Image (cartoon, rainbow, N blue to C red):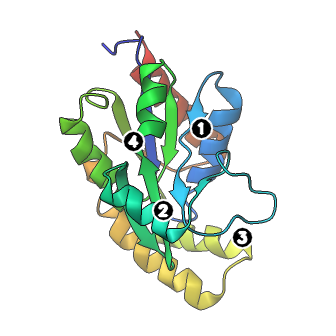
Amino acid sequence: MPDRNQGQLIIVSGPAGSGKTTVCDRMLSEIPGLQRVITSTTRPPRAGEVDAVDYYFFDKPTFLAKIEAGEFYEHAHVHNNLYGTLKREVQSKLAAGVDLLLNMDVQGAAHMREVAKKDPSLKGRVTTVFIKPPTLAELESRLRGRGTDADDEIQRRLKVARSEIEHSECYDHTILSATPEADFAALKQIYDNATAG
């Protein structure tokens, strides 16, 4: 049974177009007290983004110094920018009994799983969930339906999705994506089970 004086961390992954961001946003809006893990980046803020709300925005030298100091659980280089998950962002909230939701890629989730085996502040408090598209054809249809990506970008995302899906068996739970409603109900049930105490 989880210790309810401590928060739980729910990590959600899935290919682009799997619906993970939609279902995570709904979890955060409908579950009282559940908070999003604010990650860090070296990319400049987009219009309307706020430091310490959307991301922690750091310049590259500051970010690299934090890596050197061991302040991140994990970090990655994506599209010429650095992204990472600060230990203090997670540890302080879990210790205060706050439940956290982290939408992250397969590599980051794999790293967090390894860290959670050794880190006493995470041990027994991390649940990983993979949202899996029913088929690659359905995923392609969803990506095309967005109308935001060129064909070569859609092909690239499908190639990445194939490799991500191969990692789904490493997760505690896999949700076979159906509808946004069904996916939300499945994720909420996993969250409820993880936090029951």
Above or below, 17 against 191 in this view is below
CA gap, disc 3 and disc 4: 34 Å
| Secondary element type, mark 3 | helix
Q: According to the image, label 2 marks what residue? A: 62
* Sooner in the amino-acid sequence: mark 3 or mark 1: 3
- Of circles 3 and 2, the one toward us is 2
* Sooner in the amino-acid sequence: mark 3 or mark 2: 2
Q: In which quarter of the image is residue 31?
A: top right
In percent of the image, x 48 and y 21: which residue is there? 192
In contact (CB < 8 Å): disc 1 and disc 2: no
* Sooner in the amino-acid sequence: mark 4 or mark 1: 4
* Sooner in the amino-acid sequence: mark 4 or mark 2: 2
Circle 3: residue type: Arg
Q: Quadrant of residue 119?
A: top left
| Residue nearer the viewer, 21 or 51 | 51
Q: In this view, does 85 lie to the left or right of 166?
A: right
In contact (CB < 8 Å): disc 3 and disc 1: no
Q: According to the image, label 3 marks what residue? A: 146
* Sooner in the amino-acid sequence: mark 1 or mark 2: 2
Circle 2: residue type: Thr
CA gap, disc 4 and disc 2: 16 Å
Q: According to the image, label 1 marks what residue? A: 184
Q: Is residue 14 visible?
A: no
| Residue nearer the viewer, 22 or 46 | 46
Q: In this view, does 195 lie to the left or right of 182?
A: left
| Secondary element type, mark 2 | helix
Which numbered dot is residue 87? 4
Disc 4 crowd rating (10 Å Cα; few below 14, some 14-19, many 20+) is some
Disc 1 crowd rating (10 Å Cα; few below 14, some 14-19, many 20+) is many
